[in-house]
Amino acid sequence: MSRRVAITGASGQLGQQLAAAFGEAGDDVWPLTRPEFDITRSGDLRRLRDWSPDVVINSAAWTDVDGCARDPARATAINGTAAGEVAEAAARAGALTVQISTNEVFDGSLDRPYTEDDVPNPINPYGASKLLGERLVAAASRRHLIIRTAWLFGVSGSNFVTKILAAADRASAAGVPLRVVGDEWGNPTSTSWLAGVVRALVNAALDDVELVGTWHRAGQPAASRAAWARRILQGTDAQITEISLDEYPRPSLVPPRATLSTARPLGFPVGDWQTETDTVVAGLLS
């Protein structure tokens, strides 16, 4: 049976993949993009409600972590307040809400991966705004999925893969090694893989109300930024020098090891970020 699936942020690197995944499965997809649709505008949210969707996926967010540190109020408005209002509109329409969240709701101080049962403790405005969004979504309706992920990459948009390829070219032209942080760990996650996981979770949650709630879904195994950069640049002459977070000052604090456990069973293949990285790099360089 075809379902009505509204996707906010549908022009983003994950939103594009979500629209493709649900559309290819035969769902009636409404891809919502700015400037025609803005999650901070009440009139647009009324249009969303009136469309009577079965599923609303909020992948719209301000993901510029340093930008959020410079303007926490804007981060709160977009990632927090507006996310809750999207969920309220979805609830009024009787829809399942899916909120895409982040590993940065955690402080990165544990020496093990974070599970869904661990208590969040964000250390930057981006993480704080996304945590507020999670809480407002959960308060708006019990019929919700909060999917925490990390370090998204794909063939579209700006991400770590595209930035490392460009930075390596600049370093090579300057005749210097590429400096990459070695003590920040996370889960590189392919947007195409994650879109399939989101659809599987939606299918499961629509059939079983006990599956609603928070899920961690991200690439495995965990890796450092430097290890990921080496995978991206394998087969090239690029030279990498590892530096510490302290040597790479930025406006926002960074959780050093906010890795996610994906052990909660779903029956979907684990995201192999290494193979996915190879595929994305080949596509970008072709």
Image: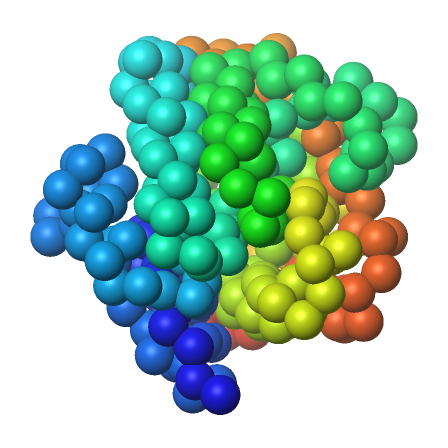
Quarter containing the C terminus: bottom left
Q: Position of residue 213 (x, y in %)?
A: 68, 46
* Residue 187 appears in the rendering: no
In front of the other: 182 or 202:
202
Q: How many marks?
A: 0
The percent position of residue 161, horizontal first and vertical second, equals 49, 53
Q: Quadrant of residue 179?
A: top right
The residue positioned 19% from the left and 36% from the top of the image is: 42
Residue drawn at x 50%, y 46% as measured from the top left: 99
Task: Examine the image and state in which quarter residue 157 appears.
Answer: bottom left
Closer to us: 237 or 281: 281
- Residue 174's image quarter? top left
What residue is rendered at 69% in x and 22% in y? 120
Above/below status of 178 relative to 91: above
- Seen at 71% across and 30% down, the residue is 258
Residue 109 or residue 248, whichever sits in front: 109
Q: x and y percent of residue 3 in the render?
A: 43, 77
Tell which of 155 and 129 is nearer to you. Answer: 129
Q: In the rendered view, does 261 fall on the left or right side of 107?
A: right
Question: Would residue 128 be visible to someone looking at this image?
Answer: yes
Q: Is residue 265 above or below residue 21?
A: above
